[in-house]
Image (cartoon, rainbow, N blue to C red):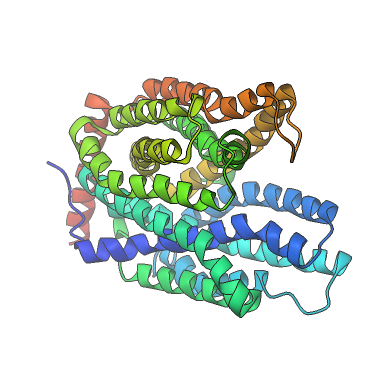
Amino acid sequence: MEQSSGMSFGRKFLYSLANMSAAVSGQAVSTWLLRFYVDTLKLPVPLYGLGMTLYGLWNALNDPLAGHISDRTRTRWGRRIPYIAFLSLPLAVSLALVWTPPAGLGGWALFAYFIVVLFVFDTLFTFVILNSTALFPEMYPSLTERAQVSALRQVLGIVGLVVAMALPPVLYTSLGWPLTGAILGVVTGLGLYLSLLGSRERPEARGGEPLALGPALRYTFANRSFVTFVLTSLFAQFTFVVLPAAMPLFVKYVLRLPDALMTVIFLTVFGSAFIMLFVWQKVTRAVGPRQAMRLSLVVFALGLIPLTFITSLTAMLVTGVLIGVGLAGLMMLIDVLISDVIDEDQLKTGTRREGMYFGVHGFVIRLSIALQGLVTSAVLEWGGYVPDVVQSSRAVLAIRMLMTVVPWIALALSFVAVTLYPLHGRRLAQVKEEIARLRAGAGTSAG
């Protein structure tokens, strides 16, 4: 019999608001940073590139470090909640400051501000969002609740993505960037503090001797379940970055549509995913997370087929709906799968290490961004792509390949990895039973 968290739907919703805040803050920086610093403030492109390279390195390294620190934290308020409670306000302020440099800065002075504020924002973002996410497997032990809450988190994450992409253009044209940044900061902070009303740490999760950094990393990468999971996620996440990167080229040079229609296309994809998240929740409960992941990979791959031949907006919007169907499953199942990995790890190490697992996962996923850049440039170079001209048939083929063949290869590799993922069927049921016994025993001891 599945264990229940005893949390009401309202508290689950409140907890999931943190994912909206993560999407608002993270996506706003990803989408508008280049536009603001290079186009508006005239930061030289080489300095922007240098800053983003340094930021990318720090972004990758701070995930496992923050996770390890969180796992070793011991306070009377818990391991995770203090970071969310005390750092959410500084995070909101730092997000606002990204868009509020002192007047008159330029050149190296603007670069220095850019680097400092970005590093502060990213460090706070990592500590707050990682700890909020780390509460998920601890709070919700059953597959039923994990599927439900993961779907809720992704739904609110989609809302956050839409806010981050659609709201700034409306705001900065009338209010300016500083006020726009302040509004984004308020939305981010409000969501995070409301999420605390739905957050809870289990006292028994704090038990066990925390591992030192070396053994923690060794146990993590020696865990077959985690290695196969993280490869599954890496290749799936690769498709999440290569498709949006290639989409503007596809719309402009293949469909020959204005850039403004990009928003309509993305809203179609996310709208479809929004609805289908609840369908995948039921599928996951019926067939288990591993099989549901395999199904979602296949459905997502099939949804890309029309991109090999479509030439109109109508066809693109229909395809967007199809893509959203499989995308929803992939979005929802990542957190469900890693939660099972963490449960199994507790049985092996005697301690819960959500921080380290989510941190290392975050580090590995950064590789998908680097991989996307290499693959995209190589394919476009092969096709003879030249910016702002009518593309040759070979260049059009290269762009179509970025939208179809390249993602298909990644999805096939993801499918192989999840097929090798050992936590399913009897093994997963055994892990669930042993975790339930541990929690029941801890509850009896506490009583």
> Can residue 128 be seen?
no
Furthest-right residue in view?
Answer: 107
In this rendering, the count of numbered labels is 0
Task: Please state if 262 lies on the left or on the right of 445 as rendered.
Answer: right
Furthest-left residue in view?
Answer: 1
Q: Position of residue 384 (x, y in %)?
A: 75, 25
Residue drawn at x 47%, y 53% is: 71
- Along the line of sight, which residue is nearer the eye, 191 or 403? 403
Classify residue 117 by image quadrant.
Answer: bottom right
Task: Please state if 190 lies on the left or on the right of 120 as rendered.
Answer: left
Q: Position of residue 40 (x, y in %)?
A: 74, 66
Quadrant the N terminus occupies? top left
Residue drawn at x 75%, y 61% is: 39
Q: Is residue 118 above or below residue 52?
A: below
Residue drawn at x 67%, y 60% is: 33
- Along the line of sight, which residue is nearer the eye, 160 or 1? 160
